[in-house]
Amino acid sequence: MAEAHNRPSPVFSFLVKMQNPLMAWLLRSSLHRFVSRMYLLITFTGRKSGRVYTTPVQYAQEQSSLYVVTSAGYTWWKNLRGGAEVTVLLRGKSRAGHAQAVTDLQQVGQMLAKVYPRMAAQQIERFAPGKVAITVELLEE
């Protein structure tokens, strides 16, 4: 029941559904430079369906580590629990990586501070519940 509380509003979900295809197109195009410092495409395989999914996400990077925070109300991140091989389109280049999703509140807070460095500690404390932290370790090129 708590998960339903974390679901994005229907209006927000509609806007995301409209934005995601546009962002995916932009990130795949030669115009990616306008958004690829903040957004990337992550591609993964569904655990149950075996289908390949791609979604745009906002990220932060420290060397070979990428950090993503998403809402627990979405379901795509569940495919990354326990670790999963992924491909990211990072600044116009495809890279292989290993992703891990965690819901631990402290880890989510630490990730929020990396992804949103201008966010105050009090904001992070309020924003962290209902979020998921994802780390992608890029593999050697």
Image (tube, rainbow, N blue to C red):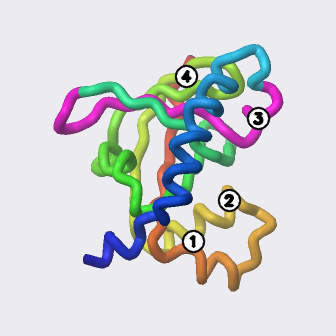
Other-residue count near label 2 (Cα within 10 Å), few / some / many at <14 / 14–19 / ≥20: some
Q: Residue at x 32, y 70 (%)?
A: 3
Amino acid under label 1? Gly
Label 1, label 4: how far apart the Cα atoms are? 26 Å
Q: Point out residue 139 in the picture as x, y percentages from the top left corner.
A: 50, 27
Label 4: element kind: strand
The earlier-in-sequence mark between 1 and 4 is: 4
In the image, residue 23 sits, relative to residue 127, either above or below, namely above
The earlier-in-sequence mark between 2 and 3 is: 3
Label 3: element kind: loop
Label 1: element kind: helix
Label 2: element kind: helix
Other-residue count near label 1 (Cα within 10 Å), few / some / many at <14 / 14–19 / ≥20: many
Q: Which mark is residue 109?
A: 1
Left or right: residue 139 versus residue 82 is right
Q: Which mark is residue 95?
A: 4
Mark 4 and 3 residues: CB-CB less than 8 Å, in contact?
Answer: no
The earlier-in-sequence mark between 3 and 1 is: 3
Mark 2 and 1 residues: CB-CB less than 8 Å, in contact?
Answer: no
Other-residue count near label 4 (Cα within 10 Å), few / some / many at <14 / 14–19 / ≥20: some
Question: Which residue is tagged 3?
Answer: 35
Asked if residue 99 lies in the magenta stretch, the reply is no
Q: Residue furthest left?
A: 48
Q: Which mark is residue 118?
A: none
Q: Which residues are magenta?
A: 33-50
Label 2, label 1: how far apart the Cα atoms are? 9 Å
Q: Residue at x 60, y 82 (%)?
A: 125
The earlier-in-sequence mark between 4 and 2 is: 4
